[in-house]
Amino acid sequence: MKLKFTDPDGLLSENNVEFVRRRLLFALSRFDSKVDTAVITVRDCNGPRGGIDKHCSLRVILRSGQELFVSDQEETVEECLARVSERMGRT
């Protein structure tokens, strides 16, 4: 499975990237033969004002060409990444 990150606002640290890599591999490991690419996008909707404004989306492209998509919005990037990884594992 290939992982691609899109972070136009510079929210992802090296720790965040490793965290989401571990979470996704755990959530999707049983489907590894079916998953081609996972694209993670992280945005800060309100800028420096704070609040529940970190938006994460996860698009998984299957080897069959189908795509799965989940997104969420949370207060911190870590919470948001954990939530979309968990939801994709259930999807």
Image (tube, rainbow, N blue to C red):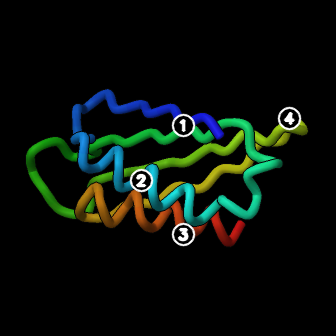
Q: Earlier in the sequence, mark 3 or mark 1?
A: 1
Q: Earlier in the sequence, mark 4 or mark 2?
A: 2
In this view, the mark in front (4 or 1): 1
SS assignment at label 1:
strand
Is there CB contact under 8 Å for labels 3 and 1? no
Which residue: 26% across, 44% down? 44
Where, quadrant-wise, is the C terminus in this rendering? bottom right
Which residue: 40% across, 58% down? 81
Which residue: 24% across, 49% down? 15
Kindly report the distance in space between the C-alpha atoms of the residues bearing marks 3 and 2. 11 Å
Residue 20 percent coordinates (x, y) = 41, 53
Q: Which amino acid, mark 2? A: Val
Label 3, residues with CA under 10 Å away: few <14, some 14-19, many ≥20: some
The residue tagged 2 is 20
Kindly report the distance in space between the C-alpha atoms of the residues bearing marks 4 and 1. 16 Å
The residue tagged 3 is 86
Q: Which amino acid, mark 1? A: Leu
Residue 54 percent coordinates (x, y) = 30, 53
The residue tagged 1 is 3
Q: Image quarter for residue 7?
A: top left
The residue tagged 4 is 65
Is there CB contact under 8 Å for labels 2 and 1? yes
Q: Which amino acid, mark 4? A: Gly
Most distant residue in the right direction: 64
Q: Image quarter for residue 78?
A: bottom left
